[in-house]
Structure formats: structure tokens, C-alpha cells
Image (tube, grey):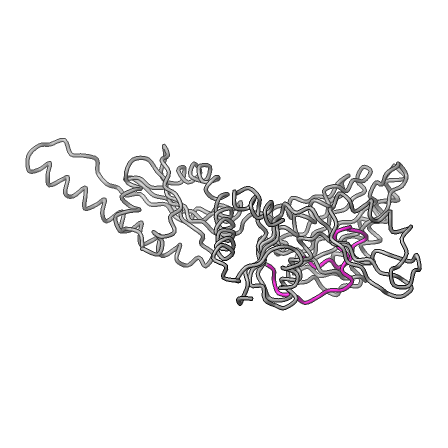
Amino acid sequence: MAINSFGDLKIIDVTYIHWLNTPELKEVSTPADSFQRFKLKKLIDALAEKRGLHTSLITLLIPPDRQMSDVIGRLRQEASTAVNIKSKTTRKNVVDALQTIIGRLSLISKPPPHGLAVFCGAITQDAPGSEKIETYIFEPPEPIGVMVYQCSSEFWLDPLRDMLSAKQSYGLISIDRSEAAFAILRGTHLQVTKTFKSFIHGKHRAGGQSQRRFERLIEQAAHEFLTKVGDYAREVFEELPDLQGIIIGGPGFTKEVFAEKGYLAQTLQDKILAIFDSAYAGEEGIRVLVEKSEEVLRNQRLIQEKRLVERFLGELARDTRLATYGEKEVRSALDRGAVDTLLISDGIEYTRVVVECSSCQHRIEKTIASSAVDEYLASLSDEACASCSNPNLQVVKMIDLVEELGELAAESGASVEVISPETEEGRQLLNAFRGIGALLRWAE
């Protein structure tokens, strides 16, 4: 059973992915979140292109606590039911896929800590009748919650796409003088944790000393209400180790008073990302706040990337020798273990190809534009080995350049940051430095 490394995604069995061809599982340090997301997206994109006839593609998600014997038993039941499918071609494809999965899972004693994702079926090739069984079995980067079995003409990839959502936590507070609500937003999951009513009286219409006395009582009640809200904010948000920021909203001026007049602990006040006006407070205001916050939350990763590239450019401008760029220079620094942070653009469209002579084992490694890979592969049939002159050159590895350099960085203990070209700095990294740069551990 072939085992391939895909960062945190451990490909246990795969028929063919042109950008994944590592012969054995390597123990590597966990790559940075942006690198893991990049690799997961690559896998999703590859699977999304697969198509089969009718219901011949099987998606199977196995939670980590599920007994493998129970899963195999379920698949055998499905196989016995599949013999009733009317279409002879579809029936054969489904049965073959189920038997393939059963055979693979029989070699696995129990699911890994995050469970297993299984995608298998007769993939339609160039012409009708040329279907070929392809199998993809891997441990996803996050635990699978429930078992899923689905047959369709395409793989069901929504659970994997959900894993691409940012998993950092954001605190939301929707407040006015009458009520407040708290929520935690993590990825696409919104949890409203608490709502408060202030029970503050409206303005007193009487005049004289009675009016002033009631105004003082109202202001005191408002102060006590905001203090209570601030205390709860500290209680719920300071316990979140992955809290990235706080967003506050509501009608009127209460939200500004709460945010700026010391009711919020300084550690939390420093995490305020935005304050929005909205027509509602309380729980309804939370829903509005989520909609208003989309652009702010999307920009958080871009801001992080912007600062990383600014630091990289600053080291180059000051000539501190704590930064380098270019594939050759960065690859050399990775080999020496000198890279602290690898910055690599996800706009790079290059592939690393390793060719080996089957006669003398002479190796050639090339970085080729992805659009030119097919032409290069075709040319190998007419090319002789530079070492022994025999025409026995074979491709032994082909991998996306971003992935290959990221894996080298992870093996050396460096962090990996995949940079989007959506910001000016990101475009500068891609265009001026060909998308490859590094912050170094020591001056060279």
C-alpha cells in the first residue's frame, strides 16, 4: 500500500495526482496554516475535476472513533445492494469501487486521529467506455464528525471546503443602552454565548430636582450595565487562545462609550478590529454584525501577509543579510537550515520535475512552467541520458513548486507563509522576486 506525504494530509492510497508523487511518508513538522490551506485547496481542485457516470463516484468519510470492521460491514451491504442497479456499466463501476475501498480499508486497523476521507470511483477519461478506477484515501487536517457515504457523478467535497474556512476565533459584541449580546465566530460557525437586558429606565419627564436625580440614577444604571458587559467580555474572550480580534456594533453612541471609556479590559481593547453602526442591538444585531464584518475578517489574513512582505522588503532595503530571494538562493538557504520563514506566492505556476535514467540512475531536476510540462514530458522520449547516453529517461517525481519548497521548509523547521497576490506587497513578491523569498535565522 503506497503512502504519500501531503503535509498534514497523509495520502494513504492514490491512483494518480500529477502534483503528488512522494514515495513514502515522511515525519515532518506541521506546516503553517496558510501552507496547509494551500495544499488542501490543491487536493480539492484535483478531486473537483473528477467525473463519473451516474452514481459511480463514492465519497466516504470515516470519523476517528468508528470501528473499521463496522465500516467494512456497511460497505459490503452497499455492494450487495448495488447488484440491483439497472445499468450494467454503472453497476460494474459501483461494485468495483466498493470492492476497491474494502480491499484498501482491510489493510488499516483503525482510523487515524482525524478519521479518514475516501474518494473512489470509475473516473471518466477522454472517451466513453474508458473509465478508470481511481482511489484517494487520506487523513484530513481536522477531525471528521459523522460518517458519510454518498454515491454521485462527482465527489462530495463540501466537508473539505469547510476546512478551508479560517478557524481563528473572533469576538462579536452588539450593544446599545437597552441590551447587549455576545457571540464567537469561528470559521462559518457562529455561537451566541450570552444576551443581557439593561432594564434602564427611559428619561424622566418631570422637572427640577426630581429630573436631575432620575438622570443621575439612569447614568449610574448605565455605568453598572456597561461594567457588567465588560466583565463578561473579559470572562468569555480572554479564555480564547485563538482570539484574533473583536468587532463591536449597535445603534447610537453606547458602543463607542463602551469601547473607549475603559469598560473593556485593555488587552481586549487592543484587539478591536472595527466598530459598526447597525439598526439593532442584542442577538439580532449579532446577525447584522456578521454581515458587516465580512470584509474586515477577510482582510485580516491579507494584513498579516502584508506585514510579512513589508518585513522581508525592509531587510533587503537595509541590507541586513537576513533575507534572500530567488529559487536557487532560497533552495540553498533551505538546505543549510538558514530559513526562518519561507514566503512563497500562490500565484506561482511552476512544477518541479525529477527525471531519472533507469540504466545508470543519473538524475535531472528541473523547474518548468506548468503550462510547458506536457511538452517537456513528450520530449523525453527522444532524449538520451547525459551520463550513459541511453534513451531511458523516466519521470520519478512531479510536484508543484510551492508544495515542494514548502515541504523542504517544513522539514527544516522553518515556517511557511503562502502569500496572496491580492495586496500590493503580494504582487511585488510575485513580480519582482518571482514569488519566492525567505527571512533568515542568521545573517549570511
Q: Quadrant of the C terminus?
A: bottom right
Q: Is residue 287 left or right of residue 352?
A: left
Q: Residue furthest left?
A: 208
Seen from the viewer's position, the closer of residues 419 and 214 is: 419
Residue 13 magenta-drawn? yes
**Residue 20, quarter of picture:** bottom right
Give me the residue at 88% from left, 44% from top.
Answer: 92
Q: Give x and y (percent) for residue 113.
A: 64, 62
Seen from the viewer's position, the closer of residues 3 and 106 is: 3
Give me the residue at 56% from left, 60% from top.
Answer: 341
Tell me if residue 115 can be seen.
no
Residue 319 magenta-drawn? no
Q: Main secondary structure of the magenta part?
A: loop
Q: Is residue 90 left or right of residue 337?
A: right
Q: Give x and y (percent) for residue 293.
A: 45, 40
Give me the residue at 86% from left, 38% from top.
Answer: 126
The mark total stands at 0
Tell me if residue 277 can be seen.
yes
Magenta span of residues = 9-31
Q: Quadrant of the N terminus?
A: bottom right
Above/below status of 245 relative to 276: below
Q: Give x and y (percent) for residue 206.
A: 11, 32
Q: Is residue 36 left or right of residue 254?
A: right
Q: Is residue 441 left or right of residue 106?
A: left
**Residue 72, quarter of picture:** bottom right
Q: Give x and y (percent) for residue 69.
A: 76, 61
Above/below status of 131 relative to 392: above
